[in-house]
């Protein structure tokens, strides 16, 4: 199954959460807080099965980070074999993806845009170009926008907008110099995600 390239707004309405984590999509969800389509307002009247609830939670998280099923499951299995709380470890692995870190630092306005920037070679890790969105960032890694890419209008706009927002507490940002540092792993309470990761654990443990 290929990567989803349709409307992130429609997908957000389907899942009932702001998958893009942008103000624009949130305003749209506030106006139309129901699934898309002709019968969107009539859906969900019946009680969903336990399986359906857990499947939807898994789909929400995978779509939030823009990851396909195979890669998502492999990450979960890795988290399940690491000491610690499986759900938290899983979320930390997702947060360490380079495309996500680029998004958290504000270089990109969405994870989809961040994936594009990384794929086009606009992002450096510790001074070296990395074009793999799933690259796993380590604590202390410095993420920088390539010199040439700093002239791109979208990146300049994103940096100006980021100056007015609070940066995620597990990353440090030097917006003036288009660089940031992944300073620590996020704690579960740092991640304001509308997700119940225990349902995902139960889904894969069935």
Image (cartoon, rainbow, N blue to C red):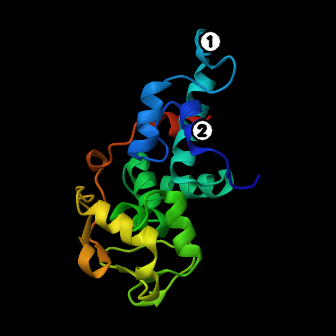
Residue 57 visible, this orientation:
yes
- Residue 23 is drawn in which quadrant? top left
Q: Percent x, y for residue 141?
A: 34, 79
Point 32% across, 43% down: residue: 192
Please state which of residues 38 and 56 is positioned toward the viewer in this rendering.
Answer: 38
Name the residue furthest front: 153
- Residue 59 is drawn in which quadrant? top right
Point 46% across, 88% down: residue: 148
N-term mark: 1 or 2: 2
In the drawing, does residue 106 fall left or right of residue 25? left
Give the residue at mark 1.
42
Give the residue at mark 2.
11
Name the residue furthest top: 46
Q: Percent x, y for residue 164?
A: 23, 57
Name the residue furthest right: 1
- Disc assigned to residue 147: none
- Numbered disc total: 2
Please state which of residues 82 and 164 is positioned toward the viewer in this rendering.
Answer: 164
Identify whether 196 is placed above or below 100: above
Q: Residues within 10 Å of mark 1 (few under 14, many from 20)?
A: few
Q: Percent x, y for residue 123?
A: 46, 79
Q: Percent x, y for residue 180?
A: 30, 75
Point 45% across, 60% down: residue: 93
């Amino acid at each position: 199954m290929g990567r989803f390239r349709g409307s992130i707004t429609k997908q957000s309405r389907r899942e009932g959460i702001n998958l893009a984590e942008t103000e624009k999509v949130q305003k749209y969800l506030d106006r139309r807080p129901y699934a898309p389509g002709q019968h969107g307002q009539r859906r969900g009247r019946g009680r969903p099965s336990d399986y359906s609830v857990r499947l939807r939670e898994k789909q929400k998280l995978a779509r939030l980070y823009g990851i396909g099923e195979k890669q998502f499951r492999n990450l979960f299995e890795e988290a399940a074999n690491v000491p610690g709380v499986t759900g938290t470890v899983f979320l930390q692995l997702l947060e360490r993806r380079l495309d996500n870190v680029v998004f958290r630092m504000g270089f990109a306005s969405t994870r989809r845009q961040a994936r594009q920037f990384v794929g086009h070679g606009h992002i450096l890790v510790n001074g070296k170009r990395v074009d793999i969105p799933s690259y796993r960032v380590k604590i202390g890694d410095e993420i920088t926008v390539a010199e040439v890419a700093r002239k791109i209008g979208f990146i300049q706009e994103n940096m100006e907008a980021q100056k007015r927002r609070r940066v995620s507490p597990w990353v440090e940002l030097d917006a003036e110099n288009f660089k940031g540092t992944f300073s620590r792993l996020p704690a579960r309470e740092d991640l304001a995600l509308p997700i119940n990761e225990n349902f995902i654990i139960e889904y894969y443990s069935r």
